[in-house]
């Protein structure tokens, strides 16, 4: 699959782009800054719904909630056969993986099309043992080209903030 680029999609729930992208940002974010320099950033995204679940369904299908049918948390799921980004990339030869948390569970069919789908516990935060294990094997555990979806739920109430980041220096 020469020429296909690896794709990492990081979505941070409850974080406005101004916190990371503004010239006047107050937080120190060297790792996020490094990812941004090497990749593509979408500072002006507009969500299709106010809830996470229908918004993610729209993100992964390119459809509005009225078309894909997911309109709230847990009460609806993608219809069978609904094309998703993961399914399309899988057909193109990508190894696809999702490491979801919060309300983005298997029961919504958001994981359809992914070769690997992990529905992690909200307590498995990115700065804890789960995150350390994930980073230890990333990206070598994926066959190229790969697409990895990594939604981070830590800033959604109740917030999980690493003890070392509980200061004004980190926003």
Image: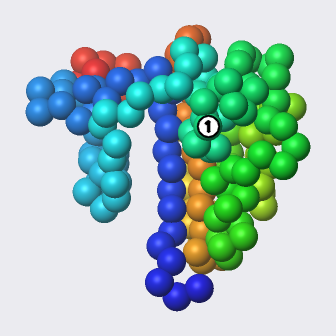
- Colour scheme employed for the rendering of this structure: rainbow
Residue at x 60%, y 30% (from the top left corner):
64
Other residues around mark 1 within 10 Å, as few (<14) / some (14–19) / many (≥20): some
Question: In this rendering, would 48 be left or right of 167?
Answer: right
Pick the residue in front: 140 or 61. Answer: 61
Question: Residue 94, image x and y in percent?
Answer: 65, 71
Question: 25 or 115, which lies in front?
Answer: 115
Helix, strand or loop under label 1:
loop
Front residue (pair 131, 1): 1
Residue placed most toward the observer, 54 or 165? 54
Visible in this render: residue 121?
Answer: no
Does residue 60 appear left or right of residue 37 in this picture?
A: right
**Residue at the image position 68 percent from the left and 39 percent from the top:** 100
Location of residue 170 in the rendering, given as x and y in whole percent from the top left corner: 29, 26
Q: Which residue is mark 1?
A: 63
Q: What's the residue at 61%, 23% (across, down)?
A: 52
Q: Is residue 137 above or below residue 117?
A: below
Seen as rendered, the residue at the extreme front is 67
Residue drawn 60% across the image and 68% down it: 146
Decide: is 90 above or below 117: below
- Whether residue 143 is visible, yes or no, is yes
Q: Residue furthest bottom?
A: 2
- Check the picture and name the quadrant holding the N terminus: bottom right
Residue 81, position in %: x, y?
84, 49
Q: Quadrant of residue 102?
A: top right
Numbered label tally: 1
Q: Where 99 sits versus 22, above or below?
A: below
Residue 95 is left or right of residue 34, and the answer is right
Location of residue 137 by image quarter: bottom right
Give percent across and percent down for residue 113: 77, 55
State which quadrant residue 171 falls in: top left
């Amino acid at each position: 699959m020469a020429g296909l680029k690896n794709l990492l999609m990081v979505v941070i729930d409850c974080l406005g782009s101004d916190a990371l992208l503004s010239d006047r940002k107050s937080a120190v974010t060297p790792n996020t800054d490094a990812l941004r320099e090497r990749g593509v950033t979408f500072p002006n995204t507009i969500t299709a719904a106010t809830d996470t679940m229908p918004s993610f369904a729209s993100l992964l299908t390119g459809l509005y909630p009225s078309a894909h049918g997911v309109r709230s948390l847990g009460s609806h799921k993608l219809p069978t056969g609904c094309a998703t980004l993961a399914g399309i990339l899988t057909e193109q030869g990508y190894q696809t993986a999702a490491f979801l948390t919060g309300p983005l569970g298997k029961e919504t069919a958001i994981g359809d099309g992914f070769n690997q789908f992990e529905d992690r516990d909200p307590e498995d935060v990115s700065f804890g043992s789960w995150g350390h294990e994930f980073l230890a094997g990333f990206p070598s555990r994926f066959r190229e080209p790969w697409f990895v979806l990594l939604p981070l739920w830590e800033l959604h109430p109740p917030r999980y903030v690493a003890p070392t980041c509980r200061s004004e220096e980190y926003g």
